[in-house]
Amino acid sequence: MLNHLASAPATPGPSPLNLDDCEVVLKVKVDREHPRVLRNIRVTVRHPVYKEVVSLLVLQIERDQCRVTADFHQILDEELDELATFSTKLFDRFGNVRPWLTGDGLLSGTGCWSEELNSGTLFYLFFVNVKDPALMGQGLGSFALNEFLTSEHVKLNDIVITWPSPMPSRQEKSKAQWDEEMARSVAFVRKNYFRRIGLTQFFAFSPNPNHPSRAIPADEDAEQLPKAVRIDAGRDLRLNSSLHGTIYNNKEPSIESKIRCAFVDDPASIRQRDQNGFTPLHVAADAGNIIATKTLLELGATDDASDRANADGMTPLMLCEGQLRSTKEFVDMFAIKWEGHSEDRLLVKAALKRAMGEDVGADEEFVLKNKWDCTCGQCAGGWLSPSMLHRLITHADWIFDTMGLEEEPSFPTRGVPIDPADIPGSPSLTYIPVSLYPSIFKTFYSGFRYIFGAMSQVFAELRDSPCRVLSATDLRVRIMSKLSGRSPWLYHMPYFHSSAIDFYFAKGGEPEYALDCAMNFPEDCMLSTGIPAIEQQVKDEFAPYPKCSNDLEAQLVRHNMGLTPERQWGPYGEAKAFLGSDLLFDGRDDEDCEEDEDDSEEDEDDSEDEDDSEEDEDSSEEDEDDSEDDEEGNEEYTDDSE
């Protein structure tokens, strides 16, 4: 959180500094827990007389590393509460911006930010700290900030985000003081071309001078939506006896008669607002109360479906969608098997959309299409997207071809199983349990290989003709039908031996071992290579397929294929320890290692900064009538992460 010190009475200080005399030092420190994702960047400005005069701290975040593992929220939550708020408020668990914050939506503010927030490296600015209050008013804060923003670390498509806020103080502040300091904090970041993301408390900076945010004058930037109010009628005694409280706490069929009785006694009751401006329909939507929702709409609360005149500025549909999203993200965070969206909440969503004039079809069809959060309308079973199917087809075909090339060299002696020492280097056999190693003869190997061919055929059929319902059992039946010859192949399969397939299953082989292997996509690693030509090639490859929220949902796909977390999956044996090591993918160069050697020195600097911040809190205040430039220089921030 970028913290700001309030303006203060002028005090005698040093002569004006010549910024040309200052030396800028930039240090990078790789995070020990997540070296592939996080780096701390500290910028220090030193003066020959006054030594260190200003510093700032930034966190560099490589989101591409999180997109395969879907742990963007988890990694930042482990760091700081502030980063947890930042990550969940603005991005999903893959590091992609929340869709309602972009374009011209109700919560997008000026609409200057779009999907470019999904590209490039993210930087989070913690603080800018002027060491000596007597040196304020000389533009040191902006000077240090711009040294970083124009450094080699910030590329044209990168984004820098910050959360301006008044500096914490030992003394209690009045609301007027707080509001004044908040205004100064916001003015500082806006002066440096940061513009608000949607209606949130966060501001972003784009180094691209042609970015739409640069065309928005500071005084025309969006203002923040008031702090969200959590609907919790069950805990609010003032609502327990009201219709709001009854709807929140009662989802049984009896709620219909209670609402109708209230309507008979007072027709206005079904649209009455609580102290935060929420109508009964808002409460029903938030609680997922389908009986109450339908009853209220039948009795004439239709206009409330579009109502935003409440403390959160949210429509009932927004509240409903927020609950659907938060429930799914909670399950994902703890790697619990997600059973899909609640049917009642989906029925609430459908009813609200109809009330707003949208044709959503029959309830049953709406639930079926939306249970697994599909947004493209072309997911097989509602959860297996065309892009995911393309990944599976490509990988299964590659494994099938690779196994064909390696078959003869892997079995030099007839009738002898594979040497276990050769298995860790195989892209496929590492997904066969160790207990089956003695059974991996050439025939077993061939049978295992044919499963990848059958899988590729099944996935191609699902991509071209997606089915409405697809369970793990359905998928297994389709694969087994291919292997048995009951289902025709889409292309010629040479040397197809049913005896090899029979041998594979007789020795304990399962189709799931091949599915587990196929789900380990090597092409996803290309997204984070940093090589534009390769990244563009990958984008072009997936261009024919519609974008979907399920495109990166590998965990969901694994679960629905039957690869549930209750069972241990591959890679097995020595390969598990080898492939699971972060050292294999560390990616740090010699420069990074040298930076780590300076950790102790930087930690000492951090301690000094903390002491300086405490001293600054007690510093005298500067004149309120200072010039605009003085206000800019007056920006002082402390590191909440320290």
Image: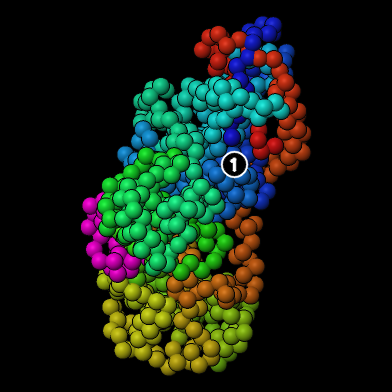
Residue nearer the viewer, 184 or 395: 184
Q: Amino acid at mark 1?
A: Glu
What residue is shown with label 1? 82
Residue at 61% across, 70% down:
575
Residue nearer the viewer, 232 or 447: 232
**Does residue 144 appear anywhere in the picture?**
no
Residue 190 lies left or right of residue 315; in this view the side is: right
Residue at 54% across, 24% down:
179
Residue at 65% across, 72% down:
574
Residue at 62% across, 33% down:
57
Task: Give the tally of numbered discs.
Answer: 1
Residue 610 lies left or right of residue 345; in this view the side is: right
Instruction: Tell me the quadrant of the picture where the N terminus can be found.
Output: top right
Residue 463 lies left or right of residue 174; in this view the side is: left
Residue nearer the viewer, 608 or 99: 99
- Magenta residues? 353-379
- Residue 320, quarter of the rendered image: bottom left
Residue 369 within the segment the image draws in magenta: yes
Residue 217 lies left or right of residue 231; in this view the side is: left
**Does residue 565 appear anywhere in the picture?**
yes
